[in-house]
Image: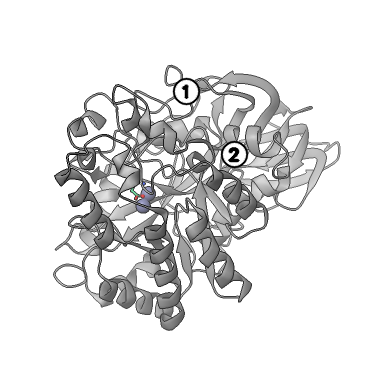
Amino acid sequence: MSVLIRGGRIVTAADDYVGDLYVEGERISLIGESLDVQADKVIEAAGKYVLPGGVDPHTHLDMPFGGTVTIDDVQSGQTSAAFGGTTCHVDFVIQPPGSSFAAALEDWQGKANGKQVIDMGYHMAVTDLKEGGTLEELASLPDQGVTSYKLFMAYKGALMVDDETLFRTMEVAAETGALVMVHAENGDAIDVLVKKALAEGHTEPHWHALTRPPETEGEATNRAIQLARVAGCPLYVVHVSCRESVEPIALAREKGWDVWGETCTQYFFVDYTFLERPNFEGAKYVYTPPPRAKENQDVLWNAVRVDTLSAISTDHCAFRWDGQKTMGRDDFSKIPNGGPGLENRLSMIHEFGVRGGRISLNRMVELLSTNPAKLFGLYPRKGTIAVGSDADIVVFDPAKRHTISAATHHSKSDYNLYEGTEVTGVPEVVLLRGQVLVEGDELVAEPGVGQFVRRARFGQELKPAPAVA
Ligand code: URP
Ligand code: ZN
Ligand code: ZN
């Protein structure tokens, strides 16, 4: 199968030019002006942007969490991603405490088999190094293409690890070349604040934020940075939401330390006041870290502009409001934490980042595709448009208007964080390794086309080679 994408504006993290792109099989084989080639399929892209497929480094599909299971499985979550211009993501395998990493990985792969619409990799979330996983087993994961370890410094009594587990994992990462990711919040302090609030009769959704003050995020971010420094491993701080955690990351990066951070789409648009919406509507915005005071949104825009934060993910952890979020009607601490968003990242960041004059088109591509691919061992197979790279391509119509709504999105969630938001600019055609996935409103490819990608170790390139199914 060959595809010619003709006359589009090809935009990567570094380049921006009009040209033709020729795809043979799964890879980009030619880029040039007015290419004289025959193709099985020709896509006319004049007036459109031709972008590398999005890479989302932070998602939770089919994940048991908060007394329930996230509503999007691999098929619905990845379908949603494909419509949003994301062609590869890295999902979290959670080690059930007491279980081996191998068993957890097998379980997650079983949930994905036959359902994959886009390509994917896995991070391993370490919960227990005493009863279940061993250091040796952890050290062997990068050989299987699982090259990042995640630790939750919050969710006490569930996923939270102590500093010993955090630090031992960091030491293993320093040896194996894995990247350590942290959910940085002080879970012990938050647990005290939650119990106190409930004892005082505060049960409404906005208490989720009041019991997780930004300082608890700042403290944990700084702790993780200092411990990673001692262990000598690279560190990536997930879902940075506020000034208190941006500042220690900025300082570490000024010093030239191996520290990176991401924020997520929702932190630019949803603020604390959303949690106060009446009739338990506020529960839709209960995710962690919580929506913050509005002034943090400018801090985050600036941080992504100056590369204090290097990626924007979605932290897609979708639940239904009706039946799942409502589990916490009488107790905010029982509201499952998380929200949908996998489908909306590109259009939202294009609308308010690029069209809003906050970041350039190149920087958008860098934040949504190139940097996640580089940081998570997928580059240059993913994350760019270059000869030899996977033909994961988004033909983006920058003039088409769209109103975001749960009525039309592809997630199984019954609400959308950005309901009613009007955007100009949507993916028109999405290709995965040369195969058309999405054309307009249609999912063209069958589930099963996506593959598991064995990622390279931190700082290493992923050479163009067949992905392993
Ligand atoms: O609320 C969130 N973010 N849920 C997903 C788990 C996590 O902390 O990333
Ligand atoms: Zn988290
Ligand atoms: Zn998450």
Is residue 285 toward the left or the right of residue 189 in the image?
A: right
Instruction: Compute the Cα span from label 1 to label 2.
Output: 32 Å
Measured as percent of width and height from the top left, residue 399 is found at: 71, 23
Residue highlighted by disc 2: 434
Viewer-proximal residue, 93 or 158? 158
Measured as percent of width and height from the top left, residue 298 is found at: 60, 46
Measured as percent of width and height from the top left, residue 432 is found at: 55, 39
Q: Residue at x 47, y 50 (%)?
A: 241
Residue highlighted by disc 1: 419
Residue type at mark 2 is Gly
| Disc 2 packing (10 Å; few <14; some 14–19; many ≥20) | many
Q: Which mark is residue 373?
A: none
Q: Quadrant of residue 137?
A: bottom left
Discs 1/2, front: 1
The yes-or-no answer for disc 2 within 8 Å of ligand 3 is no
Residue extending furthest toward the right: 33
Query: In this picture, is 324 found above or below 183?
Result: above
Query: In this picture, is 430 found above or below 146?
Result: above
Local SS, label 1: loop
| Disc 1 packing (10 Å; few <14; some 14–19; many ≥20) | few
The answer to whether residue 155 shows anywhere in this view is no
Q: Quadrant of residue 113?
A: top left
Viewer-proximal residue, 101 or 117? 101
Viewer-proximal residue, 370 or 246? 246
Viewer-proximal residue, 52 or 464? 52
N-term mark: 1 or 2? 1
Q: Quadrant of the N terminus?
A: top right
Q: Quadrant of residue 126?
A: bottom left
Residue type at mark 1 is Glu
Residue extending furthest toward the front: 200
Q: Residue at x 50, y 68 (%)?
A: 458
